[in-house]
Image (cartoon, grey):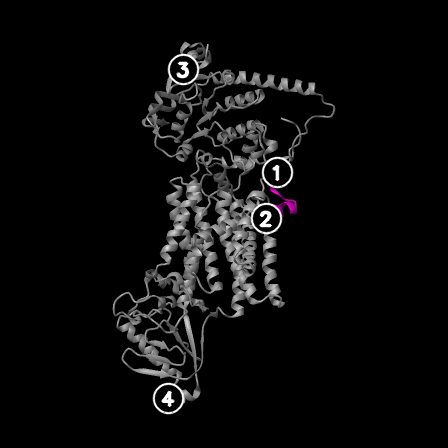
Amino acid sequence: MSDAKLVSIEPRSGLLGRLEWKFPLFLIAVFGLLVPLLYKNDLYGIDDVNMWGRYMCFALIAIGLDLVWGYTGMLSLCQALFFSFGGYAMGMYLAHHGGPEGSVDAAGWKMPACLFVVYPGKVGETEADWLVPWFWKPFWWISSTAVLAVVIPAVVAGVVGFLVFRSRVKGVFFAILTQALTVMAASVFMVNDMKLGGTNGVTRFERIVTGGREKIEITLKPEELQKRSLTIESVKSVLDKYKDSARRDGTRPPPGGSLAQEGPVLVSSPWRGVNINKDYKDLVISEAGGTKVTLKDVAELRYRGFDLKEDSVKFNLYLITLGLLILVYLMCRYIVSSRMGRVLVAIRDNEDRLRFSGFKPYKYKMAVYSFSAAIAGLGGMMYAPQMGIFTPHNMEPLKSILVVVWVAVGGRGTLWGAVIGALVVNYGYNFLTSRIPEYWMFVLAAVFLGIVLFLPGGIASLLKQFGGWSKGQWKKTVGRRGRASEGEPGETDEDAAGLAAEEMRKRLDRIAMLRSVTQEVDVGRNLLDVKDITVLFDGFKALDVNEFSIGHRELRVIIGPNGAGKTTLCDVISGKTRPTTGQVLFEGADITHEPEADIAQLGVGRKFQTPTVYDSLTVYENMSLALPGRQGISLGSRNTAEEKDSIRALLERVRLLDDEHREVAYLSHGQRQWLEISMLILTGPKLLLVDEPAAGLTDEETVLTAELLLESREEHSIIVIEHDMEFVRLLDSHVTVLNEGQVMAEGSVAEVQANEDVKEAYLGR
C-alpha cells in the first residue's frame, strides 16, 4: 500500500452527483415559468399554455417509466394503462358535475353525464329507472377522486408486480406481459356495458367543484317574489320539510345537502325532487307530501366551482401541473439518490448478486413499480380536465410504446431526460401533424432509430457533455482522486521489480504463518451437513453426495474435473438449485428448500465463478450494499462512522481504497474478484462459498487472494472451489475431490496428489 495521502471523499449524493439533478431541475423550472411569462405578455395564447400543460402530464408518465426502466431495467409497456386509470378517475368526477343539471337517479344521485350515452338495459326501462353504479359514487368528491387516481394504478401495479416478480419474470417476457395487460384493459373499457361511455369515454367536463359538493346558486327577481307572495324563508321552509320527511321515512338524504342562512337560495345537487329544465329557467322544488313550489324567471343562475372553459382555470391547471412535475422529479431524485436507489441499480446490473446477499429484489420491484404507476395516474388525473375529454384510446398499446420513445429520446436513466423527451417529442408531433400529418410517424421512427444507433444516451447525454459534467468525466475525475503516483522520481524498472519481489516474499511468509496458525484451530461441531443429496438434470445425475460436512472456522477446498458437480454442490447449499433428494443442514436447521435470500440472511455467502458485482455503482456503493442488516427497503439510511471504517479497512486490505469512488465497470478482473470477496466478508457470514477465486489472476493477485482467504479463516468457515493447484497448495488445507457428482477422495493436498484414482481422473500422470 502506498504512503500517498488519500483524499477522504463521501460517497456522492446520487448516482451521478449533486450537479446532475440541480441543474436539470433549474432548467425545468425556468422553462415551466417561461410559458406563463409569455402568456402574461400576450406572446402566448391560452391554448398554447394548455398544450404545454398536457405535455407536462406526459412528462409525469415518462418519469415514472424511466424510474423502472432506466434504473431497474424493467421495460413496462402498460404505463399508458396506469395513466388512463388516473384520467378516468378525474373524468368520472367531472362527469358527475357535468351534463343536464338536476338529472338524478331513483336513489337521488346525480346522473353522470356519460351515463346518458348508455341505453337502458331492460325492456321498458327509462332514465327514471336508472341507478348510478356503485363504482361511480366515490368519485363525487374531489378529495376522494384525487386519492383514488393514484391509489388505483398503484394497487393494480402492486398486484401485477407481486404475481410477476415473485415468479422472477423479467426482460422481454415482462414487457410482453404488460403489453398484453394493456390490450385486455383497452378492450374492456371500450365495452358500453361497463357504463364508462364505451369508445366515447367520459365527456361533458364543465367544472371543478371544491369542497366535494356541486351547488347551484339562484337569485330571484324581487318582483317575482312579491308576485307569488314568496320569500327566501318560505323556500327554505319547503326544503327543510323535505329533508325532515326524508329522515322520517328512512330515506337516505343525498350527499352534501345544505342551504345558506342568508343571501341567495343555495340548492345542493344531487337532490331528489329538485330539477332544473334544460334552459335553466325553472326551478321546481317538490315536497314529499305533494306540496309544490315553482319559481320562474330567475334573475341569475351560476354554479359554485371553477368553469374549465375559463382562461384563468386553464392557466391555474398549468401551474398546478408544473408544480406536481417538479415535486415528482424531486421525489424520484431522492429515491434514486438513496440506498434504495442503489439497490434498484443493483437489480438492473446483477439481481442474483442481490439475492445471494440477503435481499429480496421482488419487494423493491413491487415498490418502485407501484410508485411509477401512481405517478402515471397523477399525470392522467391532471390531463383529463386540460384535455376536456378522456377516452380509452389513451390506453392503446401504441401510447405505451410512445412513452418508451420519449424516455429513449430524452435519455434513459436520468429522470430529467424523460421530461425533455416527452416535451420535445410531443411538441414535434404537434408541429409535424399540422404540416405533414401523413409523414409524422415516419419522422418519429427515424428519430428513434437515430437515437438508438448514434446517441444511445439521448438528448441528456449531449447536454451533459456540453455542460462538462458527464458521467464519464465524473469517473475520470473522482476515480483518480488520492491515487498514488506511478513511481518516485528517478525510480528505474529494476528498482520497481526489486520492490515487487520483496513484496511477494513478505506475502508468502505471511501465508506460511497463517497456515500454521489456522491448522491449530479447533474445528468443533459441524456448521454444515449435506446428507444424501442428489440432483438430476433431465435424467442426468449431476450430484450424488452421501455425506459432506464442514466445521466452524474451517477452510475446505473442493477440486475435480469439469462437470464433477462442484458448482452444483454450492448451488444446493446456497438455495439456487433444489436437490432431487436429500437434506442440507446449517447449524442443525434444515435449509434445503429455503429461498436464497433467507439462506443468505442465516449466514451463507456465495461468490460465483464470474465476479458478480454492480458495474454501474462505485466500489464504495457496492460495499455499502453488502452491510449486514440493511436488506430491507429504506430510503434515508446513511452509513455510520463505524461502517465506513469497516468498508475502508477491507478495501485497503485488497488495495482498492484508492478506487473507492470509481465505478466498478472500470476495474480489472482481479480487482472485481477482490471486491466480490470483500463484499462477502463484509456481510459477516458464517460460511463463505467461494467459486474459483484465482481464475484469471496474475501471480501477485493469486498470492494476495490466498492471503485474504486465510485471514478470513479466523472468523468464517470457507469452502473454496478451484482448478488452480498452485493456489490450492498456497491454501494447504483439507481437500475434497469430486468426480461424476460423487466424493472420490478427501485429505491433505499431499494425500490427494498421491491418490492414484485422483491422478487418473483429474490430476493426470
Q: CA distance from mark 1 to mark 2?
A: 20 Å
Residue 635 visible in the current orientation: no
Q: Which residue is mark 4?
A: 228
Q: CA distance from mark 4 to mark 1?
A: 85 Å
Residue 384 at x, y percent in the picture: 46, 62
Helix, strand or loop at mark 1: helix
Q: Residues within 10 Å of mark 3 (few under 14, many from 20)?
A: some
Q: Looking at this view, is 647 or 701 the one in front?
A: 701
Q: CA distance from mark 3 to mark 2?
A: 61 Å
Amino acid beneath label 1: Lys
Which label was assigned to residue 746?
3
Q: Which residue is mark 2?
A: 459
Q: Looking at this view, is 29 or 762 the one in front?
A: 762
Q: Are marks 1 and 2 in contact (CB under 8 Å)?
A: no
Residue, x 40% and y 45% (percent of image)?
177
Q: Work out whether 355 lies above or below 78.
A: above
Q: Which residue is mark 1?
A: 475
Q: Looking at this view, is 328 or 591 the one in front?
A: 328
Q: Residues within 10 Å of mark 1 (few under 14, many from 20)?
A: some
Q: Are marks 1 and 3 in contact (CB under 8 Å)?
A: no
Q: Are marks 2 and 4 in contact (CB under 8 Å)?
A: no
